[in-house]
Image (tube, rainbow, N blue to C red):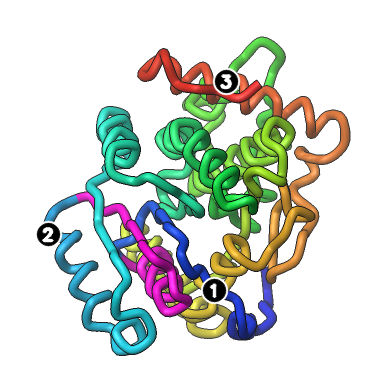
Amino acid sequence: MMSQPFLPPTPEGVNFAGQTVLITGGNSGLGLETARQCLTLQAKRVIITVRSEAKAQDALSTLRADPDVRGSNPDATFDAFILDLDDYQSAIDFVHKVKQEVAELDVLLCNAGTFNCYSQFLIVLELLPLLRATAATRKTPSRCTMVGSYSHADNTLADHPLPDGVSVVEHFDNPANYVKFKQYMNSKLVVHAFVQHLATLVPANEVIVNAPCPGVVATTLMKDFPLWLRAIIFVWHKTLGRSVEQGARALIYATRVAAEETHGKYLSNNEVASAASVLSGKDGQEFARRVWTDSCSEVRKVKPDIPIPE
């Protein structure tokens, strides 16, 4: 991605009035900015996830103090629920809390950038019935959006093909298939495959499922990279990157503006785009099915009674 078009402001008249929005990974960066924009667009309730009580208070204080939120939506409710996506039990406890405390869910935005796969998949599967029930009540589709990336096309399958009889989880976890700095790309590929197959099981008139790429955005996602690489990325962000505000617009588009034609699709620059070649055609459908089957098997290990659409 050598250049990015400017993403215009969200169109006039688009809003989340009366809706409940849940955003994973919402204490900073894209997640927090998307929460802020949802609130300025009249969301009734916005729930973000954070990894600690201290981060919860910091994020909520930021939202409460935002002049645009205070001016446009002073009666909104916003909460922060604890969720550590690196811990399956935390994800299980989180969905239990959501089911206990959230009666309606219009939008589920899986945003947390460095934890792309199985805890997020568990959350999607557990909350899908609530999304569908809300759609039935509202007479309009709910949204399940998993943040994707253009980088999913730069995966390692060309050099390390997935053999028959080997699960996707085992393949990408195998040290023999490891390529430095490529696990993020592989994890985003798995996200796109999961979204693609999920869309074949859930009608678009119930839940629109899509995977937008916010583009190159100047966030703290790369904070743990080596210093030399962070320096390169810093320059890249400054010359080509979008602001966090612009990047969040891509997520607002996917969760509110994008319609049924985006169901199961990869979005780039607010348009349906071609996904990686490994996801195209009959072979792509089969790969997506394998990702789905293996992912469901993985989460069933920790949550045997998880509801899985068929």
Q: Which mark is residue 15?
A: 1
Q: Which one is in front in this view, the residue at disc 1 or the one at disc 2?
A: 1
Measure the C-alpha gap from mark 1 to mark 2: 30 Å
Instruction: Confirm whether the magenta stretch covers residue 118.
Output: no
Query: Can the viewer see residue 159?
Result: no
Q: Residue at x 51, y 34 (%)?
A: 129
Determine the secondary structure under disc 2. helix
**Above or below, 131 relative to 237:** above
Instruction: Tell me which segment is drawn in magenta.
Output: 28-51
Q: Residue at x 47, y 39 (%)?
A: 130
Measure the C-alpha gap from mark 1 to mark 3: 37 Å
Q: Which mark is residue 254?
A: none
The crowding category of the residue bearing disc 2, from other C-alpha atoms within 10 Å (few below 14, some 14 to 19, many at least 20), is few
Please identify the quarter of the rendering in which residue 177 is found: top right
**Residue type at the position of mark 2:** Ala
Q: Could you tell which of marks 3 and 2 lies nearer the N-terminus?
A: 2
**Residue type at the position of mark 1:** Asn
Measure the C-alpha gap from mark 3 to mark 2: 36 Å
The crowding category of the residue bearing disc 3, from other C-alpha atoms within 10 Å (few below 14, some 14 to 19, many at least 20), is some
Q: Which one is in front in this view, the residue at disc 3 or the one at disc 2?
A: 2
Query: According to the image, label 3 marks what residue?
Result: 294
Nearest the viewer among 30 and 63 is 63
For the view shown, which residue lies furthest in the left direction?
A: 54
Query: According to the image, label 2 marks what residue?
Result: 54
Nearest the viewer among 74 and 178 is 74
Q: Could you tell which of marks 1 and 2 lies nearer the N-terminus?
A: 1
